[in-house]
Amino acid sequence: MSRCRTSVVGAGAMGCGIAHVFALHGHPVHLVDVSPTALERALLSIRRNLDRQGVAQPEDVLHRIVSFSDLHEAVARADLVIEAAPEDLALKQTVFTRLDAAAPPHAVLASNTSSISIASLASATARPERVIGMHFFNPVPVMKLVEVVRGPATSEATFEQVFRLARDLGKEPVEVRDAPGFVSNRVLMPMINEACRCVMEGVASPESVDKVMTLGMRHPMGPLALADFIGLDVCLSIMEVLYEGLDDDRYRPCALLREMVDAGRLGRKSGRGFYDYEAAS
Ligand code: NAD
């Protein structure tokens, strides 16, 4: 696909990064969000990140991004739609039904979901062969990986188109099947969950657990610092998807993780998680 008219649904952390990368590679982008504030913030943040990357003509890149508050208008001429709305099954299904009605018949509908099954999103449309997962990582302009998730009905043509496009964007796509947590979260989240258990059982403090993993395993960040960065609520909901989907006790969310989420200790975004961030913010 040389010039791909791309619509990005949701201008939060991920939608903003996805719009940035597509526009940087010459694709016209329609960015749509229900919140005008989110759209404003996204454009400011893209501008800042382009400057940070040292892009020579940031205005040219920004000109390729047009923001919309109306979903129908935003996708009416799209070749590809990437949904990056909140991680909520009912909400995403509603969005996919609306996208199916509003986007041209040839358009591919992709989701950036971290854990929801592509099959459940495809079933909300009449074009399951053109529904696929395109799972980017945060921050999108920096992180190379894209998990390209084949749903059970995804056609070969759709898969190849998206896989090639991810490569053309300078990413390293990896093919994965539509299974709970795909590969990234199926491997990462149980490690975070186990780190929580170590703290809960008094095996070690959060600092010590993280030190073991950074110094001993050369992880760039300890699992608990990473959990705070991702958001403990997000970690808990992904563990729940794994526990339910894989039906195995080893994925049971750690009780401490649940208690912390119930108490509003969500990590960086709430100022407190395994570590304290209030002083820094
Ligand atoms: P976010 O909360 O930062 O952004 C979501 C945006 O969607 C918000 O701006 C919200 O106003 C908007 N929105 C809500 N309902 C909408 C609708 N009906 N139509 C259009 N916009 C709507 O979320 P995020 O962190 O960017 O995550 C988005 C998706 O990406 C989720 O599925 C998440 O699981 C996935 N993801 C997140 C990360 C991460 O590290 N944050 C990494 C990979 C994948």
Image: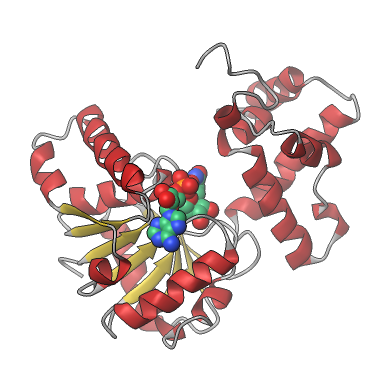
Closer to the camera in the image, 123 or 38: 38
Q: Position of residue 211 (x, y in %)?
A: 69, 20
Closer to the camera in the image, 184 or 199: 199
| Residue situated furthest right in the rendering | 201
- Does residue 43 lie above or below 202 as drawn? below
Q: Position of residue 147 (x, y in %)?
A: 48, 59
Asked which colour scheme the image uses, the reply is secondary structure
- The image quarter containing residue 268 is top right
Q: Is residue 67 left or right of residue 164?
A: left
Q: Residue at x 40, y 46 (%)?
A: 12
- The image quarter containing residue 235 is top right
Q: Residue at x 60, y 57 (%)?
A: 183
Q: Is residue 25 visible?
A: no
- Does residue 69 lie above or below 37 as drawn? below
| Residue situated furthest top in the rendering | 279
| Number of callouts | 0
- The image quarter containing residue 68 is bottom left
Q: Is residue 90 left or right of residue 251?
A: left
Q: Is residue 202 visible?
A: yes
Q: Quadrant of the N terminus?
A: bottom left
- Does residue 36 lie above or below 183 as drawn? above
Q: Is residue 259 left or right of residue 223?
A: right
Q: Position of residue 83 (x, y in %)?
A: 41, 62
Q: Residue at x 77, y 64 (%)?
A: 244
- Does residue 154 lie above or below 205 as drawn? below
Q: Position of residue 163 (x, y in %)?
A: 36, 67
Q: Residue at x 27, y 56 (%)?
A: 31
